[in-house]
Amino acid sequence: GGRGGAAMKFDVNAILRDTPTAVAKTKIVCTLGPTSREVPVLEELLRAGLSVARFNFSHGSYEYHQETLNNLRTAMKNTSLLCAVLLDTKGPEIRTGMLKDGKPVRLEMGKEVTLTTDYSALGDEATIAISYKKLPQDVSPGSQILMADGSIVLEVLSCDVAGGTVKARCTNTAMLGERKNCNLPGVVVDLPTLTEKDKQDILQWGVPNDVDFIAASFVRKGSDLDNIRECLGDRGSSVQIISKIENQEGLQNFDDILDKSDGIMVARGDLGMEIPTEKIFLAQKMMIQKCNHAGKPVITATQMLESMTKNPRPTRAEATDVANAVLDGTDC
């Protein structure tokens, strides 16, 4: 890929002719979910070109994932087609707490809300619990706090470190449910990249099941990879590590991370919480170019053909997005 754009020959026949599918060089990573874990469906996926099966350890028990993997291996045997197995770690995350009566609350634009680091507190319209203990130290007046995939944006007014609270103002009106994710754009979050849960997932499920890849969530610096390798130890020394770049810190330390990784995943979803949406394409192109240059595989992820979860055909914009990622030089 890369600089081939100018030299490409286009003609009408090439556009109107049937596309030969046998020459697909770009691989496809599929996340296996509730509707795609039965043997017949997995066989269809393998025939259609599934190259890597992603197991998302943000959800599901070991038994659930084991059943999916067993089905996948049965499907591989039946079709004589192989695919790689990728364990995607949950990684460090900040979540909002539980709510009174368990019902979603309506946060109103312009209203003040208090965030408390007492995670046992039950929230309402005026108070929301946050799982990150160092929130009052790490944000400051003017900082933004994003909740529920950025559907709610709070602006920090004041921080009370001793009391463990932060006062903030809602910049928009939206409903907030329980245990939603939180992003602190630009903040260097003091949480380990490999959590205790991640270590267990890798050592008790990943290594014994002989997974091919681990996708490490929220990789922020080169030393994160040293820790993951150490965790894998001798038994997991053949496992390859794909670093997911999902925040500003990861972008800033990209060269170091790339140097120590076997591959990179451009995680556009969380990256979009951290840098302006209109700049994601730049980050994507930069990372892909550097991976191509280093000769390491790169995966472009999040919202690829997103609307096909509901519709049989993708939007034109989505189809173009996927093709442009391939032209950028993405491998998967």
Image: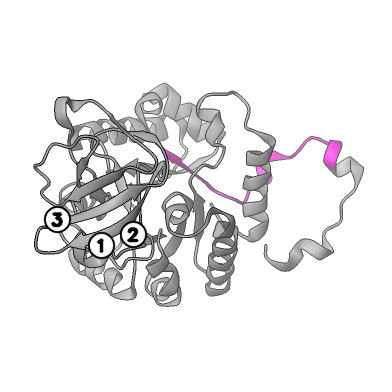
Q: CA distance from mark 2 to mark 3?
A: 15 Å
- Of residues 63 and 269, the one drawn nearer to the viewer in this rendering: 269
Disc on the earlier residue, 2 or 3 = 3
Residue 211's disc is none
Q: Element at badge 1?
A: loop
Q: Is residue 306 above or below residue 135?
A: above
Q: Residue at x 64, y 59 (%)?
A: 328
Check if residue 250 falls in the magenta segment: no
Q: Which residue is mark 3?
A: 196
Q: Quick one: label 3, few (<14), some, or many (20+) residues within 10 Å?
A: few
- Whether the residues at callouts 2 and 1 have beta carbons within 8 Å, the answer is yes
Q: Which residue is mark 2?
A: 218
Q: Residue at x 51, y 42 (%)?
A: 303
Q: CA distance from mark 2 to mark 1?
A: 6 Å
Disc on the earlier residue, 2 or 1 = 1
Residue 193's disc is 1
Q: Which image quarter is the N terminus in?
A: bottom right
Left or right of 2? Residue 29 is left
Q: Residue at x 68, y 56 (%)?
A: 327
- Of residues 105 and 62, the one drawn nearer to the viewer in this rendering: 105
- Of residues 240 and 242, the one drawn nearer to the viewer in this rendering: 242
Q: Which residues make up the magenta segment? A: 15-31
Q: Element at badge 2?
A: loop
- Whether the residues at callouts 2 and 3 have beta carbons within 8 Å, the answer is no
Q: Residue at x 12, y 46 (%)?
A: 119
